[in-house]
Image (tube, rainbow, N blue to C red):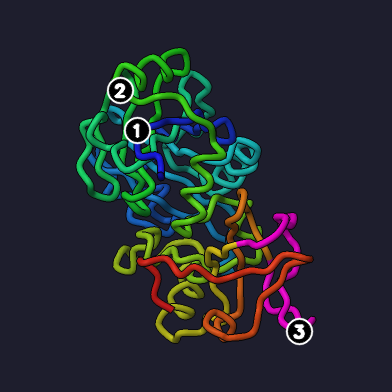
Amino acid sequence: MQETAPRYAIAESRSLLVVDGPDARSFLQGIVSNDVGKVTPEASIWAAFLTPQGKYLHDFFIAQVGETLLLDCEAARRDDLSMRLRRYKLRAKVSIEPDDGRGVAVAFGETALPPLDLPDTAGAAREIEGGTVFVDPRLPAVGARAILPAARVEGLLETAGLRRSDTAAYDTLRITLGLPDGSRDLEIEKSLLIESGFNELHGVDWDKGCYMGQELTARTHYRALIKKRLVPVRVEGALPAPGTPVTVDGKEVGVLRSGQGGIALALLRLDRLSGDEPLRAGEARLTVQKPDWATF
């Protein structure tokens, strides 16, 4: 029987950047794929930072605590993100600093939202104890995220009625739902947002105006130029390493990304998503598991 008790895990692979100052919002608005104007203490977003050619560099969640914007990003790549953002600072009155006083956790399971007093609405947020908890802006089914004082993350979440779990359990749910996890699933300076479902997972705003890489992103969307999609695949056999080619009759048709147990994400050619030919990665057999939210 599938476990549905509300759980949380400390997201040790994540860290925070504080973007503050009078021009913080307008500064980010001209750079990221989503509408920063939608971010309030009651609403968060998911967004990407692209190359001028529209290729993936970083993605992150943007939440607000008080008047400050917090970027929930990959810990191993935080310095790179900070450096790239600073290049576009110019005369803007904005500061970009690491925040090591707060930690990030994920709350997951079918009943994870009520203990945090959150509705089943993508991005819904509320401030708590010098931090914030918010429904995952991509898909409420995966649960919520918490940005809280580092020394109190566990205590606050357990007081709310959640119990400690591990990131492997969260990853299994995330992958099953078809949600990418940063550079584990998107190739830096190569991946396109539409390939990974950013438009369907509320990571792109089509009405916000110009931002870095906007032209290619819009063109691939409106002209239906995408030839590949990132999708969950059921794995029969030992889980191959990320980067393992996916083949049909020895011909490469995609590549495996992050995985956990018997489930993984794979970037596959669209013409192979519903084919009868067996997909393989190494010695493992793969079966496409199309998420309910996805339209191919």
Element on which disc 3 rests = loop
Q: Which of the pair 277/186 is nearer the observer?
A: 277
Q: Mark 3 belongs to which amino acid?
A: Asp
In the rendered view of the protein, which quadrant contains the C terminus? bottom left
The spot of residue 84 in percent (x, y) is 60, 47
Q: Residues within 10 Å of mark 1 (few under 14, many from 20)?
A: many
Q: CA distance from mark 3 to mark 1?
A: 43 Å
Q: Is residue 279 above or below residue 51?
A: below
Q: Mark 2 belongs to which amino acid?
A: Gly
Element on which disc 2 rests = loop
Q: Which residue is mark 2?
A: 161
Q: Which residue is mark 1?
A: 6
Element on which disc 1 rests = loop
Q: Mark 1 belongs to which amino acid?
A: Pro
Q: Which residue is mark 3?
A: 249
Residue 218 drawn in magenta: no
Q: Residue at x 72, y 55 (%)?
A: 238
Q: Residue at x 48, y 18 (%)?
A: 101
